[in-house]
Amino acid sequence: MTKSIIVQPSRRRLERMEDLTQSDAPRRQSLGAVFWRAARAVYPSRARRLVRVRLDPEVVDWFGSRRDDPHSGLNAVLRAYVEGRRNDSR
């Protein structure tokens, strides 16, 4: 398991950050307090290995449309799955 790194910027730094809120962003229902209490930040490992995987084109397109780096999103989903399964087997 990788070591978690949590960065908490100071209030001053947060106030200086650019507001990237989009006024035309769609409204969505909140995931709720229960979800956020159980949520954990997952950070990528620094010891990644290059692998070749065949994926359906629509899967690649979907991840590619969500981030600057589609591999990071796909890796985060796979990591969450592995962590969830690891916890199930205990």
Image (tube, rainbow, N blue to C red):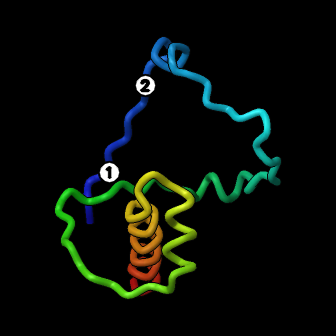
Residue at 44%, 19% (x, y): give it: 10
Q: Residue at x 44, y 62 (%)?
A: 70
Residue underneath mark 1: 4
* Quadrant of image for the C terminus: bottom left
Q: Are marks 2 and 1 in contact (CB under 8 Å)?
A: no
Counting from the top left corner in percent of width and height, residue 64 is at 50, 63
Disc 1 residue type?
Ser
Q: Tell me if mark 2 has few (under 14), some (14-19) or many (20+) residues whose alpha carbon lies within 10 angstroms of its own.
A: few
The residue under the point 51% across, 20% down is 17
Left/right of residue 83 with respect to residue 65 in the rendered view: left
Front residue of 37 and 23:
23
Measured Cα–Cα span from mark 2 to mark 1 = 16 Å
Position of residue 37 measured from the top left corner of the image (x, y, whole percent) = 61, 53
Amino acid on which the number 2 mark rests in the picture: Pro
Give left or right: position of 35 versus 23.
Answer: left
Q: Which residue is mark 2?
A: 9
Q: Residue at x 80, y 52 (%)?
A: 28
Quarter containing the N terminus: bottom left
Between residues 5 and 16, which one lies in front from this camera angle?
Answer: 16
Depth check, front residue: 26 or 44: 26
Q: Could you tell me which secondary element the residue under label 2 belongs to?
A: loop
